[in-house]
Image: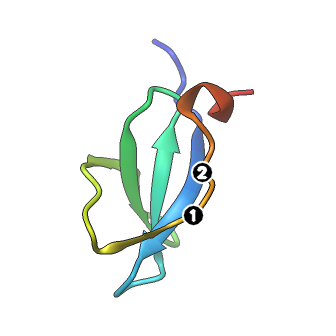
Amino acid sequence: MMTNVFAAIGQRRDDPYTLLLLGSDGRHYAQALPDGDPAPIEPDDGWDVDDNPPRADEVAE
């Protein structure tokens, strides 16, 4: 099993304590702070995303 590494690339517009993560596996995840587990999602317009997020292959570097 491979460990997934995450980069925070955004947050929910209506809840800044919910982060949008990009996994080293290329999938997007949502994580509620302070102690939620990352859950796979398909981002929609409800997310405020970084203007220059890393590529998935850069996340694990």
Query: Residue 44: percent from the left, percent from the top?
Result: 25, 63
Q: Which residue is mark 2?
A: 53
Q: Amino acid at mark 1?
A: Asp
Residue at the spot 45% in from the left edge and 26% down from the top edge: 25
Left or right of 43, for residue 48: right
Up-down relation of residue 1 to residue 15 (above or below): above
Mark 1 Cα shell of 10 Å, populated few (<14), some (14-19), many (≥20): few
Quadrant in which the C terminus is drawn: top right
Residue at the spot 52% in from the left edge and 72% down from the top edge: 34
In which quarter of the view is residue 45 placed? Answer: bottom left
Alpha carbon separation for disc pair 2 and 1: 6 Å
Up-down relation of residue 25 to residue 46 (above or below): above
Q: Which mark is residue 50?
A: 1
Which of 51/30 is in front?
A: 51
Q: Which mark is residue 37?
A: none
Q: Are marks 2 and 1 in contact (CB under 8 Å)?
A: yes
Which of 49/20 is in front?
A: 49
In the picture as drawn, the residue positioned furthest to the bottom comes out as 14
In the picture as drawn, the residue positioned furthest to the front comes out as 51
Which of 37/40 is in front?
A: 40
In the picture as drawn, the residue positioned furthest to the right comes out as 61
Q: Amino acid at mark 2?
A: Pro
Residue at the spot 44% in from the left edge and 60% down from the top edge: 20
